[in-house]
Amino acid sequence: MHFYRRGFLSAIAKTALLCSLGTGLGGASSLAAAADGYELINPPQNTSTPDKVEVLEFFWLGCPHCYSFEPMISAWEENIPENVVFVREAPPLNPSWEQHSRGFYAAQLMGQEVPFVNAMFKAIHEDRQRMRKPADMAALAEELGMDREKFLKTMKSFAVQTKMNRAMQLAKSAGISGVPAIVINGKYRTGASLAGGNQGIISVIDSTIAMEKQSMGLQ
């Protein structure tokens, strides 16, 4: 019993650490970049939209830090600058995150990413529901107007597995080991610990977007 409890507590501690790190174990960055609240990704990563500046958030639905950051990044997205795209990835950096990742990508494939994220954050962090079982997530999806059986089938689909594999590869390539973490245009990695808090993350996003726009000749 003692060994089980120790292992269980260790797993919780590791999950909490992953959630709170917010930045990864990437290559060395310049002191100037670190002072500006970000680390340089070397080599820079490809983005989903080469003709626009990509802001990519790595997150986990069960992460309290991601939940607390959500209002700020949502408010920023409502006034997203021209020629900028915002995308999310939910890699299962910890095996215990897998079902949440599957639920996220299933909702994304069914065109309900934002409503599902909002509902899951509320259920987990406000209503104190674990929401780890596919059946529980499917019930929530049904409340949002999705077909329950289709949602469950999609969670187990090859398409979702492909998205999860890709998210893990993106996280690895960008040096991400914890969430929330933000990557701007495949070049700059930031999080609360680097930026000095959630508002600092937004400031880093804005400043690096400006740099990227200038280098790409965008308005």
Image (cartoon, grey):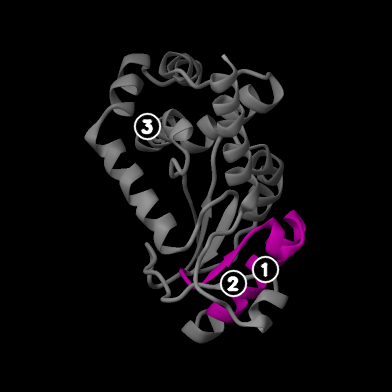
Quadrant that contains the N terminus: top right
| First in residue order: circle 1 vs circle 2 | 2
Compared with 187, 31 (above or below) is below
On screen, residue 112 versus residue 212, left or right, reads: left
Between marks 1 and 2, how big is the CA–CA gap? 11 Å
Between marks 3 and 2, how big is the CA–CA gap? 32 Å
Q: Position of residue 109 (x, y in %)?
A: 35, 36
| Mark 1 burial class by Cα count in 10 Å: few <14, some 14-19, many 20+ | many
The magenta span reads 186-212
Residue type indicated by callout 2: Glu
Q: Secondary structure at mark 3?
A: helix
Q: Position of residue 149 (x, y in %)?
A: 32, 15
Whether residue 71 is visible to the viewer of this picture, yes or no, is yes
Q: Nearer the viewer, mark 3 or mark 2?
A: 2
**Residue behind mark 1:** 204
**Residue behind mark 3:** 106
Quadrant that contains the C terminus: bottom right
On screen, residue 110 versus residue 205, left or right, reads: left
Q: Secondary structure at mark 1?
A: helix
